[in-house]
Image (spheres, rainbow, N blue to C red):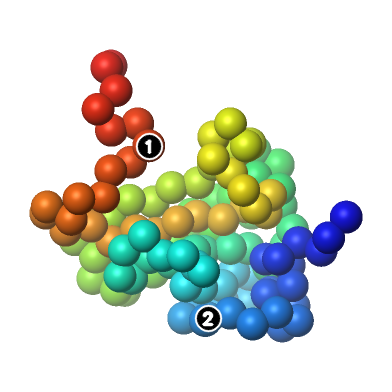
Amino acid sequence: MSPCPFCEIAAGHAPADIVREWPDTLAVVPLNPVTLGHLLVIPRTHVPDFTDDPVVTGLTAQRTAELARDLGLTAANEITSKGGAATQTVFHLHRHLVPRAPGDGLALPWTGQAA
């Protein structure tokens, strides 16, 4: 089994463009950002997904909200996933913070679905 890439980043063993650090969490630019300013907020503790440790999940959500506020984002998506069927590809909790703008053309996976 290969090491968790986010654990490697958190430990300082893998390169990353880190934009903010807290004692428990860090924010990095993803390898393939979908918009300018797209960030990942990841806990330093290995937690596979948002159901595994509600305390870490809540803290990661808090850090994401702080970051969005501090960046002055007026429109954004904050997204996390659980499981491959939900598009999770790295099994370490992470929250996507995606700045949005009118007419940016970025569609969420479920855009256009019937309610």
**Which mark identifies residue 10?**
none
Q: Nearer the viewer, residue 100 or 103?
A: 103
Judged from the image, the secondary structure of the residue bearing numbered disc 1 is loop
Which numbered disc, 2 or 1, marks the residue closer to the eye?
A: 1
**How many tags in the picture?**
2
Q: Residue furthest right?
A: 1
Q: Which residue lies furthest to the top in this view?
A: 115
Q: Few, some or many C-alpha atoms within 10 Å of disc 1 (few <14, some 14-19, many ≥20)? A: few
Q: Which residue is drawn at 58% across and 79% down?
A: 16
Above or below, 75 relative to 81: below
Above/below status of 1 relative to 71 = above
Q: Nearer the viewer, residue 64 or 85?
A: 85
In the figure, is residue 5 to the left or right of 22? right
Q: In this view, does 90 lie above or below 7?
A: above
Q: Residue 35: x, y in percent?
A: 31, 63
Query: Quadrant location of the N terminus?
Result: bottom right
Q: Residue at x 25, y 27 (%)?
A: 112
- Disc number placed over residue 18 in the picture, else none: 2
- Mark sitting earlier along the chain (2/1): 2
Q: Is residue 66 visible?
A: no
The percent coordinates of residue 12 (x first, y second) are 71, 83
Q: Mark 1 points at which residue?
A: 109
* Kind of residue indicated by mark 2: Ile
- Residue 28 appears in the figure: yes
Q: Which image quarter holds the C terminus?
A: top left
Which secondary structure, mark 2?
strand
- Residue 54 on image: x %, y %: 63, 44
Q: Residue at x 58, y 63 (%)?
A: 42
The residue positioned 20% from the left and 50% from the top of the image is 105
Looking at the picture, which amino acid does disc 1 mark? Pro
Q: Position of 111 compared to 41: left or right?
A: left
Real-space Cα distance between discs 2 and 1?
A: 27 Å
